[in-house]
């Protein structure tokens, strides 16, 4: 009988677990298998933005549309199973990256199934190169605010964090080619340690977050995690008088919330309207989409295909502005994993969760299969200063040139009913986060 893999996918944290024992406090250099594996610096092979890749891979447009399509399928399935939640957010980009890494450990038809679920137009090599470019570009624009320039001035704190980690039981032999592929394209932290050690949970939580895991199944031998976080200010800040109380028409009744009003780029389809608002330092845009009054949020999400998504973004015109009022909101993570197994099965990945999965490109062992893939919901706070995750952007509104923009706005749009929000990579239009807001 095959051992279990349980994948704890964390959008805030994504984890994939495979079967084994329990392990430790903080990881030693010996336990960190990825520490001494150097990334190939040839950008024609890796397309790593930080290493100087000046252009995306040839297949990047296909990758972007195919991965976005996969993420929207996952979103529709996720909402269908969580429609009782007033507000939620998850990070489907983490799921896609984790599956891309997992594909490198799969073999034969199992590998083909994973790659095809992400994109039926790309082979694994192209998937790896595009994933490398996508993720490394986001990291290149990130700063924790502690770096200094040549004049000794600290850089501005702003970041998008997408990090993957894999945890192996000490009994598992890891193939060198798998470690090399990880170093070249994904940059995940790969640890091998004794799962049965009394400090196993502490070691895992030092990476996943405090109290994320309370125990480890001794029958497991691998779990993988991905974490996400964001912190950045708006490119155009709100004026002092642009934040005011207003009414939100929740499904549970009228609520008083704080609205932020500014002139923003207007987007639309025949089913919904929305806006795009850019971040200052990271290559990310905030998108809010509200269905038309005669369409419920549930109905709109069920029909939100990639075609609807691309039509919405393609409607963007730099000169088309609307006076948009968006409520401040905050969604806090409970730090606990939520299974995505059924959602991924509905995305065409049912084989991952059966004993037919072949993971022989990770290890010589041939008795592994994926038991579960789950996600720890990320935290998101949207206020007048910007967007934060594990920490909120300081909400100090500052005067700017929004009043002149108001004069040229063509319409008014108030997000006073349940709506969708996304954080999207500017270049590829791949969603990083997708969520819904209700009060």
Image (cartoon, rainbow, N blue to C red):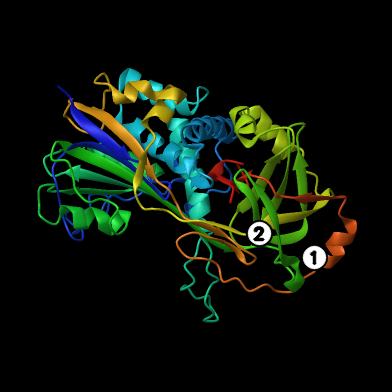
Q: Residue furthest bottom?
A: 152
Asked if residue 237 lies left or right of residue 352, the reply is: right
Above or below residue 322? Residue 217 is above
| Quadrant of image for the N terminus | top left
Evaluate whether residue 304 shows in this view. Answer: no
Residue, disc 1: 402
| Residue name at image x 66 percent, y 59 percent | 256
Residue 419 rendering spot, x and y as whole percentages: 64, 44
Above or below residue 26? Residue 437 is above
Q: Check if mark 2's residue and mark 1's residue have beta carbons within 8 Å.
A: no
Above or below residue 36? Residue 404 is below
Helix, strand, or loop for circle 2?
strand
Between marks 2 and 1 in the image, the one whose residue lies nearer the viewer:
2
As drawn, the label of residue 212 is: none
The residue closer to the viewer here, 191 or 197, is 197
Q: In which quarter of the image is residue 68?
A: top right
Asked if residue 417 lies left or right of residue 18, the reply is: right
The residue closer to the viewer here, 141 or 17, is 17
Residue 286 rendering spot, x and y as whole percentages: 63, 51
| Residue name at image x 48 percent, y 34 percent | 78
Q: In whole angstroms, how far apart are the C-alphas of marks 2 and 1?
A: 24 Å
Residue 353 rendering spot, x and y as whole percentages: 30, 25
As drawn, the label of residue 256 is: 2
């Amino acid at each position: 009988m095959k051992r279990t893999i349980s994948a704890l996918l964390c959008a805030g944290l994504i984890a994939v677990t495979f079967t084994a024992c329990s392990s430790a406090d903080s990881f030693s250099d010996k336990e960190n298998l990825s520490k001494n594996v150097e990334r190939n610096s040839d950008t024609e092979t890796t397309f790593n933005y930080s290493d100087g890749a000046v252009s995306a891979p040839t297949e990047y447009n296909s990758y972007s549309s195919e991965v976005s399509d996969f993420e929207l399928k996952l979103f529709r399935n996720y909402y269908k199973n969580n429609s009782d939640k007033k507000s939620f957010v998850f990070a489907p980009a983490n799921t896609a990256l984790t599956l891309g890494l997992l594909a490198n450990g799969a073999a034969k038809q199992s590998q083909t199934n994973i790659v095809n679920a992400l994109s039926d137009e790309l082979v694994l090599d192209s998937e790896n190169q595009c994933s490398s470019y996508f993720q490394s570009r986001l990291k290149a624009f990130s700063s924790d605010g502690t770096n200094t320039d040549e004049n000794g001035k600290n850089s501005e704190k702003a970041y998008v964090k997408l990090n993957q980690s894999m945890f192996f039981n000490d009994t598992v032999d890891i193939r060198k080619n798998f470690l090399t592929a990880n170093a070249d394209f994904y940059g995940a932290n790969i640890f091998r340690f004794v799962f049965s050690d009394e400090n196993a949970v502490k070691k895992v939580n030092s990476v996943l977050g405090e109290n994320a895991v309370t125990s480890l199944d001794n029958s497991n031998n691998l779990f993988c995690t991905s974490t996400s976080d964001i912190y950045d200010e708006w490119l155009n800040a709100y004026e002092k008088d642009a934040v005011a109380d207003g009414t939100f028409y929740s499904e549970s009744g009228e609520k008083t919330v704080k609205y932020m009003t500014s002139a923003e780029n207007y987007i639309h389809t025949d089913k919904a309207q929305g806006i795009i608002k850019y971040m200052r330092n990271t290559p990310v845009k905030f998108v809010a989409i509200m269905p038309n009054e005669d369409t419920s949020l549930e109905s709109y999400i069920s029909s939100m295909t990639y075609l609807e998504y691309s039509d919405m973004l393609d409607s963007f015109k730099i000169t088309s502005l609307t006076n948009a009022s968006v409520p401040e909101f905050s969604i806090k993570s409970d730090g606990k994993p939520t299974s995505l197994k059924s959602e991924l099965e509905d995305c065409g990945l049912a084989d991952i969760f059966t004993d037919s999965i072949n993971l022989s490109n990770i290890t010589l062992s041939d008795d592994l299969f994926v038991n579960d893939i789950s996600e720890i919901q990320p935290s998101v706070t949207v206020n007048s200063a910007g967007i934060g995750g594990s920490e909120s952007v300081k909400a100090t509104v500052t005067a700017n040139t929004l009043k002149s923009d108001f004069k040229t706005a063509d319409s008014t749009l108030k997000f006073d009913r349940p709506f969708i929000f996304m954080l999207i990579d500017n270049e590829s239009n791949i969603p990083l986060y997708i969520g819904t807001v209700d009060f």
